[in-house]
Image (cartoon, coloured by chain):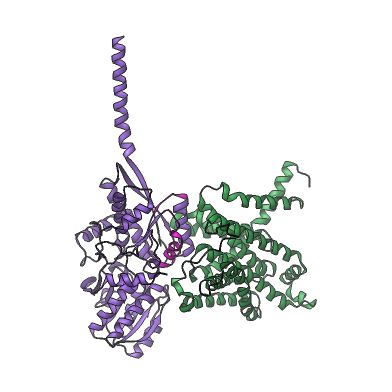
Chain colours: A green, B purple
Amino acid sequence: MKRALVPLAVLALLALAIAAPQYITVRYYVQLILLAMIWTIMAHGQNIIQGMTGYVSITQAGLMGVGAYASTLLSIRLGWPVWASMAIAPFITALFSVFVGYPSLRVKGHYFAIVTLAFNMVIFIVLMNFTSLTRGEAGIFNIQRPEPLFGLVDFDDRVAYYYLVLTVAVVMTALTWLLMRSSIGRTLRAIRQNENLASACGVAVWKYKLFAFVASAFYAGAAGALYAHYIGFINPETFGVAQSLDAILAVILGGTGTLFGPVLGAFAVVFLPEYLRIAESFRLIVYGLLLVVATILMPRGALPLLGRAWHAAARRLGFPK
Amino acid sequence: MKSFRTLSKLSALALAAGALLTASPAAAQRELVIGVTDALTGPGAVFGLPQANSVQMAAREINAAGGIRVGTTTYNLRVIQYDDKTNPTEGTNAVRRLLDRDNVKFLLGFCCSGATSAVASFIRREDAVMLVGNAAERAITTQGIPNLFRTRPPADYTGQAAGAFVARQGPRRIAVIGSLEVGLYVQYLDAFEKEFAKSGGTIITKEAFGLRDRDMTPQLTKIRALQPDALLVIGYVEPAAFVYRQSLELGLTVPRFGFTSGSEEQFLRVVTSAQMEGVWDLKPTELTLESASPVGVRFDANYRAAFGSSPSPSAPYAYDQVYVLKHALERAGTVTDTRRIADAIRTATVPPEAVMRYLPVGGQMFDENGQAYTSNGAFQWRNGRWVFVEDLPSDPVDYSKFLRSLRQ
């Protein structure tokens, strides 16, 4: 795509997202888009550690759970305003991830993936068994939506909450874009390409990797807080290893290391299983097969494929290069 | 001219008669869609699938008997069902799909607590009526949600009665093994322990297993070394069946009590009848042919004929929901005003078609919390099947007050 067209396409997509609740008559689809936007935030975080740095972390859902529980407990147990709880939750998650990342990043490659997988399981078990705080499997009910904004916007209304999530998703996407363009982003990509070479060039590789992990946790924490106050109920079920694998899938499906790939992947991860409900009990088999086929045919994700399709279409239509 | 007038009159009459003949049945016979969300796959499917089948069966029976008469209109039921996989997000999406896309106002099923709790947290804001079945987590009916009703009593209501029963049987030192990370089982155990302690009994150990665990020999080996007087097994059918089998394989021959709600067929997939001999199940008086009324016996026969397998003992919780709804719609005289329909349910008596043996509170099926109560019963495995032995003394009025006191 011609570079000048990219901002236009982004603006068009944004306009579409802003207008969506007004023209979608079936509110169920607003729900799915809203969840997909929360997943977008989570997938952006996954993309920072997986796509930009080259470290596959299998703990993103666990970290999302930390954010969800942090925000919920602050607002319910300590009586904090929901806005404050939601704002602080990503920072708590980021702080927590320092303790997870510090030992995890001592190892590389598959070992790193296994250590983070173990951490996700530890988070799950703690959430499940620390019942005096988390109520375990029974979960926490009646999690409030944020207080009305200036007494005007009532977030009990799903559409209002949609715009809140859209705003956060746009801000997080913009942050990711800034990170990608910054020297930190370039360093992270250098680590992904050749960690030893980057280290030999004097880069404090370990610090950058920890930064990427903590940043990804920050995104997961934000996604968790938004999720908890939207659904109104949380239990550990939502924050297990299966959901972490979905986050990895979102990045792979959309396009690893790209800005908009995780957006595409997040929508696929939310919408595909829902659309396959027509296949009922076969839907998970169909979903699995689709993912296998997609991964084989699109190893770099859907976004590069879409880019090539755009170029081909532009050539046929005779658009100038 | 005269013949033309006569012809005109005759034509008008014929048209009017034709309109009456064709229009009146079409106008009076309509379709009413009810939605089911339940665990149709995964570990919860042992409860969810029979529940969903039961709703289908009740709807077919009602349609065959002429439908639901609301005012001058008769409605035939059509059921849409979605799988919630016992997952809160899946459950929320399934219900949103029913409410927003399929325009359903009546939600039934709900076998498992996680997904049900997620839906319960927002259903108050919706123009809908929710009837919960087997999901036994207490907090579902402690929130005073005006449009939510549950046919199954909470787990601790049964645990209390079970504790008193086991104490009467004589054991003093009990070892517990179960799904102790699942809220409803924890609540059952807490109530059991409190009641059991009143008679001087103690729980000497609490060992946990996961929903998908199949090898419980490490926990049972530890329990055997502690030499308990009895074993209490609480959890889903399959892991519980493995515990019963492996306890005998390890030579643990003490009396075995349980809280599982599994059918004979479900247990016999894992364990032999000989290995099950003498096991107690202390649970709400659910469907067993021994305890069933003629309605229950008919339900069992119809279910087997329709689905080729026996219903799970908890399946009628969902079957009864359909009849509760039917009578409420007929009493409310509307299918659209959910507030009036919820009021009709709240003041309903137990429908004559109900399979479970409900204990009304103040003459009504549901108490002020939207909670129904069945009697609790002691069932024992004898010669290949569950035999109803006795009722466990339970006080729904007292428990109802306790439940109300928990409302936040």
Which quadrant would residue B275 be assigned to in this image?
A: bottom left
Please check the rendered image and state whether residue B46 is part of the magenta-colored stretch, yes or no. no
Q: At which x and y percent is residue A265?
A: 61, 59
Please check the rendered image and state whether residue B103 is part of the magenta-colored stretch, yes or no. yes
B363 or B221: nearer the viewer: B363
Residue at the far left in the pictured view: B294
Q: Quadrant of the N terminus of chain B?
A: top left
A184 or A298: nearer the viewer: A184
Which quadrant would residue B317 be assigned to in this image?
A: bottom left
Residue at the far top in the pictured view: B1
Q: Residue at x 35, y 90 (%)?
A: B226
Q: Is residue B143 left or right of residue B347?
A: right
Q: Is residue A291 left or right of residue B342?
A: right
Highlighted range, magenta? B101-127
- B341 shown above or below A121: above
Residue B363: tell me if it is visible.
yes
Q: How many marks?
A: 0
B403 or B268: nearer the viewer: B403
Q: Quadrant of the C terminus of chain B?
A: bottom left
- B371 shown above or below A207: above
Q: Residue at x 70, y 49 (%)?
A: A310
Q: At which x and y percent is residue A138?
A: 43, 71
Q: At which x and y percent is residue A37?
A: 59, 59
Q: Residue at x 20, y 62 (%)?
A: B293
Residue B43: tell me if it is visible.
no
Q: Is residue A210 left or right of residue B360?
A: right
Q: At which x and y percent is residue B56?
A: 33, 54
